[in-house]
Image (tube, coloured by chain):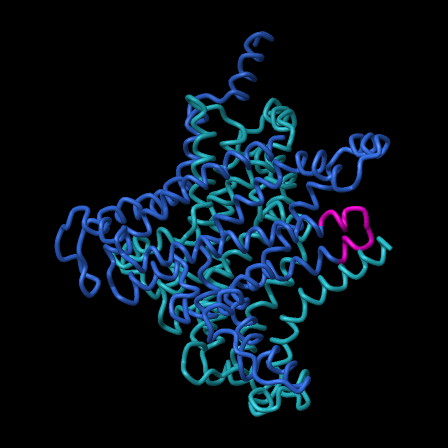
Amino acid sequence: MRRALTLAAFVLVLLVALVPLYWMVQVSFKPNPEITQQGTLYPHTFTVDNYDRLFAQRSFGSYLRNSIVVTAASVAISLVLGSLAAYAIARFRLWRRMERRIGLALLTARIVPAVVIVVPVYLLVLQLGLLNTWLGLIIVYTAFNISFVVWMMESFFREIPVDLEEAAMVDGDSRLTAFRRIVLPLAAPGLAATAVFAVIVTFNEFLFALVLTSTPAAMTVPRGAATLIGRIDVDWGAMSAAGVIAALPIVLFALLVQRHLVRGLTFGAVK
Amino acid sequence: MTAGAAAIRKRARVQGAGLDRALPFLLLAPAVLIVLLVFLYPLYDGVRASLHFYRFGRALQNVGLDNYRDVLTDERFQQSMVVTLKFVALAVSIETVLGLGLALLCARQLPFIRFIRTVLIVPMVVTPVVVGIVFRLIYASDVGLFTAVSQHLGGNEVQILSKEGTAFLGLVALDVWEWTPLMFLILLAGVQSLPVEPFEAARVDGAGAWRTFLDHTLPMLRPVLAVAIVLRTIDAVATFDQIFVLTRGGPGTATQLISIYGYNTAFKFQQVGFAAAMLLMVALVTLAFAFLAVRLIRRSATA
């Protein structure tokens, strides 16, 4: 009885989780007349026109390129700078435990929702003349990612015994050589998980992309996808195709690191 | 060279001397500077903006605290606060109950867990804008899933986003779909780490399932529940992307959360000072929540 109940709940959960996504995917492969007039439950006529249109008539290729550049650059910069800072916090004792306070301040900054600073960040980027540029987005995303990377990497570094580096340093390595030769390889799985998590969050970001970019040359994928909506005449086919393209790489990425995902989403509170 | 001198040199290497003493500061500086530039300077700038009157995006004059007074007496602000609180309370409590129930149901079903965990990761990593698109496609009165199913069963078009009550519930359903998985995964980790002994003792004592849940499961899950609820609450207050795509806050003000109203006042109506004042007040409240979250995270991360 209990087993049957569990099984029923299990099937229901899977259906609820997947049917909404199925609906978007199947709409994306239908011709427009079938979408709006026939209300079919699966594509009776299969077509990839919606995808073609995204790239031919809209600038989706450009959005993809912008997303990849901005995400790669900001994640790379924040991994390097964030790991160095995290190492300092994990291994040094500064005056009045300043390193610990800095770590907590960064975490607090990361947890406060972006929407409460979006107006002043917009004014800042405006003053710097960086609206509609990759650099503007990269700077903002790097700041968000750094605070996250520092917090996550600090906890990964702490799990590595100090003895290993000290042995290497007694043998003549400098601090930074020991960091590169001993600590970094041991922390590689954590670094990879942090990187993938940062990629997901950055690629998905919308609010700053909405406020800081308005030209196809600078818009990211979520920002571009949102431009397909809001006209009186909605192009459902293109909209669903855009949704599929935006979601697919991120879902695949996330499945690669599912073991670490909850740790990332809860800032390390749940391991 | 004596053994003593060699030992001192080793110590100097390990503890750091000269440039090494500045090392931690050099390591910390770039990260801290970037975060200061993007978070702290704007906060200072935001305070300054909140004290000015703007027209067409330009600061015209210093108006002191007028913007703050205007925000507090603004009916639409109060309305959006009510919508936000209703949305957060409803969505987060549904997610908590569903997530906890599912976690307790699945905790001992190992073959299920691997599969269900993989599937449930999908809703929470899908781009939030796309989640908005997904539900727009489901709710649409002409091309939507509900309308299609209803027509197959001989019914009519289903109107969801055009009516205030159903649009609000539709938004709550979206949030529940997207974030119950996170609640479930966090609480599953909590349930799986519970000790076995208290439950065996309770069974020996003849306690019922409900009693055991109230006396043992719930109290022991408190720390992990606290982290999950606080993080989810902060996130839910700031829900923006999905609403922007789904309803833009409408119909009327039915789904106009504070984030949407703040965005509209700043970027649609160009009342930058007013918006800055409003969002700063929201920032203070969420900052208090963030401090609470950091305390909880630190406690469970080091436990």
Relative placement, left or right, of B25 versus B198 is left
Relative placement, left or right, of B22 versus B212 is left
Q: Which chain is cyan?
A: A
- Residue at 48 percent of width and 23 percent of height: A93
User: In the depicted view, which residue is nearer to us: A266 or B242?
Assistant: B242
The region drawn magenta spans B103-115
Colour given to chain B in the rendered image: blue
Relative placement, left or right, of A176 versus B186 is left
User: In the depicted view, which residue is nearer to us: A121 or A67?
Assistant: A121
The answer to which image quadrant residue B196 occupies is: top right
> In the displayed structure, would residue B287 be above or below residue A159?
below
In the image, residue B150 lies at what x, y percent? 64, 82
In the image, residue A213 lies at what x, y percent? 36, 66
Which quadrant, please, contains the C terminus of chain B? top right
Instruction: Please say whether residue A128 is one of the residues in the magenta stretch.
Output: no
Instruction: Please say whether residue B109 is one of the residues in the magenta stretch.
Output: yes
User: In the depicted view, which residue is nearer to us: A257 or B98?
Assistant: B98
> In the displayed structure, would residue B11 be above or below residue A127?
above
The overriding secondary structure of the stretch rendered in magenta is: helix
- Residue at 13 percent of width and 57 percent of height: B60
